[in-house]
Amino acid sequence: MEKLTKRQQKALELSELPRAEAARLMGISERNYRRLLENARKNGAPVYRKASNGQAETTIDNVLEAPDGYKVKGTSSLVGPDGNIKQQWIKTDIDKERQEQIIKETFIKAISKVKPLPRVKSPKKLSKDTLTVYPMGDPHIGLYAWSEEAGEDFDCDIAEKNMRAAVSYLIEKTPNSETAVILNLGDYFHADNQLNRTQRAGNALDVDGRWARVQMIGTQLMIDCINIALTKHKQVVVRNNPGNHDPHTAQALAISLSCAFRDNPRVIIKGIPNPFFFYEFGKNMIVSCHGDMVKPAKMQGVVSNYYPEAWGRTEHRYAFLGHFHHENRTEDNGLITEIFNTLASSDAWHHASGYRSKRNMKALVLDIEDGEVERYTFSLKRESLCS
């Protein structure tokens, strides 16, 4: 065993205490305390346990630490007739504080790698009488699908290529509205954290690569989409609905975008945690949510109750949803509710369950007086545009 430093020895002496308390007594962070303890044990230091007489005794050398993001919550021991421990099992649990720290460190790292944004010049000829809306139906960046199992391949690189092609195509086709709304309908990211499960239902997710890489790709992609929109529109309003797959990372994405465009008055990042987005343009009213909590059939009652004054002022009222992946448009007592398709493919579970829908992205043009007057569609069948 190599000689331990004084700090490593002190860390070992405090190892019976909760990690937060031990770190406080040493005047260091929990992360640094954990590293001290790991280095001490790598050098062959024994792990201390309490004996029946209250004295510290050594039982097993080099007990493995819990994986990063987890903590040891207890042990089970097999004791032989001679009173010595023959085998020992370590029980672990999620370390919520450490996982939150990992998430913060990941986004700090992601933001630090974002290059200063070049200023995009505003077009000269603009229409104040139209608003262009670019709904992004459930991009699911980070989803992994293998064609042999799910019918077609899908990963981060494919998602990025398709989204970039779709946004470029639609912005080229739409008129020069003074204002545009990039409306991420939710589930922009496929997984909310490194557990790769949905938060509420705990469903297992097929994920492409490391969680941090997915966040960096998705954040940079949204920044690029906003910059593309700035070439056509003077002002770009951006909203990221929280989805059932990304309730926390949707908020982190909004914060990252706010930082990236903090010095650009032409970009407005609409924040969350409010699950509903509201936007009024002339005689048009747009309300949007992901669609997992409030079902489409209830949107008319929700919109009229939540926004009664705007309901009275407007004539063309729209509720835009994601979540279901298939296209559907209904009109009910003064409200048009529309569900949009996704560009993402099905994962293995949805493919095996028979779920399949068209994959496209749309752009809607609303007239200040007459409501929707134009609509454009990018389909993945335009394979040459995705190359």
Image (spheres, rainbow, N blue to C red):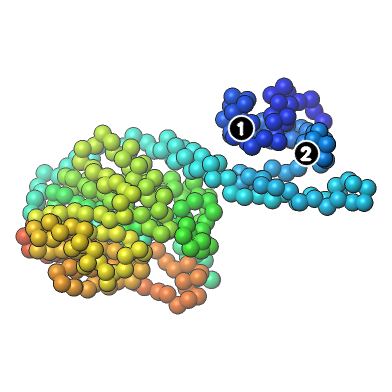
Q: Name the outermost residue toward the front.
A: 53
Residue 224, horizontal then vertical, whole percent: 32, 47
Mark carried by residue 21: 1
SS for callout 2: strand
Q: Which residue is depicted at the point 33% across and 37% down?
A: 259
Q: Which residue is mark 2?
A: 49
Q: Quadrant of residue 64?
A: top right
Depth order, front residue of 217/88: 88
SS for callout 1: helix
Q: Amino acid at mark 2?
A: Arg
Can you say which quadrant of the picture contains the C terminus? bottom left
Can you say which quadrant of the picture contains the N terminus? top right
Q: Is 204 left, or right, of 228 in this rendering?
A: right
Residue 339 visible? The answer is: yes
Disc with the residue nearer the chain's start (1 vs 2): 1
Instruction: Note whether 179 is above or below 293 in the view shown.
Output: above
Depth order, front residue of 42/294: 294
Instruction: Note whether 149 is above or below 58 in the view shown.
Output: below
Q: Which residue is depicted at the point 43% across and 58% down?
A: 245
